[in-house]
Image (cartoon, rainbow, N blue to C red):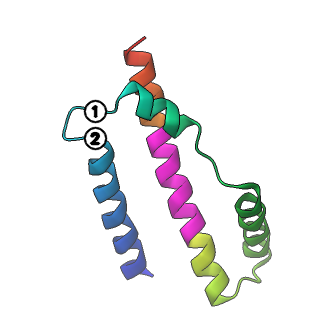
Amino acid sequence: MVQADSRAAAHADVLRRVFDLGGHGMTRSLAEDILSLDFPQHDANRAAELNAKANEGTLTGSEEAELEAYINVADLLAFWQSRARQTLQDRA
């Protein structure tokens, strides 16, 4: 599990640098686009289903990996959207 967590952290670090756009920060247009992103309904339903199974303690190994992927993407999306809101606020 530690190896997967460190891989996810490494991926997150690279993506954070990509969205910094060469140290110049996020453009207003990109910020607006990022704020419009969300999981498709099918994926949101699947993540909720997996969360419920996790709470019940009935996740299989493959379901745990799938839930971890949803969590990692959700964390990155939350980070990007936070940065997007900052960008829009700073430029208002």
Provide the secondary structure element on which disc 2 rests: loop
Answer left or right for 25 relative to 73.
Answer: left
Crowd band around label 2 with a 10 angstrom C-alpha radius: few (<14), some (14–19), many (20+): some
Crowd band around label 1 with a 10 angstrom C-alpha radius: few (<14), some (14–19), many (20+): some
Between 2 and 18, the residue placed more toward the observer is: 18
Answer left or right for 63 relative to 30.
Answer: right
Q: Nearer the N terminus, badge 1 or badge 2? A: 2
Q: Quadrant of the N terminus?
A: bottom left
Residue closest to the far bottom = 61
Dominant SS type (magenta): helix
Kindly identify which residue carries mark 1: 25
Answer left or right for 11 relative to 47.
Answer: left
Query: Is disc 1 in contact with disc 2, using a CB cutoff of under 8 Å?
Result: yes
- Please give the range of residues in magenta: 69-81
Which residue is depicted at the point 76% across and 55% down?
41
Where is 79 relative to 47, above or below? above
The amino acid sitting under disc 1 is: Gly
**Residue 48 at x, y = what percent?**
76, 62
